[in-house]
Amino acid sequence: MAFTNKQHRQRYADDEEHRARKLAANKVWRTEHSKELNAAWSERWHTDPEFRASKQAQRRLRKYGLTPEQYQRLLDESNGLCIICKLAPARGLCIDHDHRTKQVRGLPCSNCNSGLGFFADDPKRMRAAADYVERANGAAAPGVRATLVLRAEAGHFLVRDADAGRRHSS
């Protein structure tokens, strides 16, 4: 007697040994055919925009709990630009989230998103880095009386006095 799909599904759900055998057999088959499966998936990813969009939406939902409507709202709010540098990204926007709360914060470009990660989302470290870059570029931060400029010659330093704009060699 032939089983119906409903009967197969019911047996799979009810019979733990049957389910374990099926899972093991499927794993063996997928391992043996992984090259063909990966090639077919890759081909479809590159040629079928609907498939690609569907997989991206599934990943956003699974990883961030972000529905397609919520993602579109974030995209519309930023006009498709990076939420931090306000530039159009070359490769698309990233989804930035707080690692502690798992809450989505916005859509930065990959460079800005990496920068946040490199500074461990610590605003003090980011401000210190910004002050450092400003000092290195000659713009003294508030409360800084002088900036140190390193020259290519070993042992030669140039100090810019923030008050008078004078230079001192040492």
Image (cartoon, helix red, strand yellow):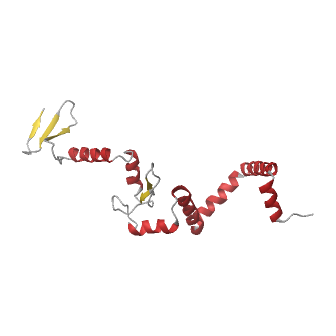
Residue drawn where x is 43% and y is 65% of the image: 74
Q: How many numbered circles are shown?
A: 0
Instruction: Provide residue 53's location: percent of width, then percent of height.
Output: 55, 66
The residue sitting at 27% across, 44% down in the picture is: 128
Q: On the rendered image, what quadrant is the N terminus found in?
A: bottom right
Q: Is residue 125 left or right of residue 21?
A: left
- Residue 96 falls in which quadrant of the image? bottom left
Side of 119 where 165 appears, left or right: left
74 up-or-down from 130: above or below: below
Q: Is residue 121 left or right of residue 140?
A: right
Q: Quadrant of residue 110?
A: bottom left
Residue 120 versus residue 104 in the image, above or below: above
Instruction: Give x and y (percent) for residue 55.
Output: 58, 62
Q: Residue at x 21, y 33 (%)?
A: 153
Q: Position of residue 150 (x, y in %)?
A: 21, 37
Depicted 130 relative to depicted 71: above or below: above
Answer with left or right where residue 18 lies relative to residue 94: right
Compared to 51, does 129 lie above or below?
Answer: above
Outermost residue, top side: 155
Q: Nearer the viewer, residue 134 or 6?
A: 6
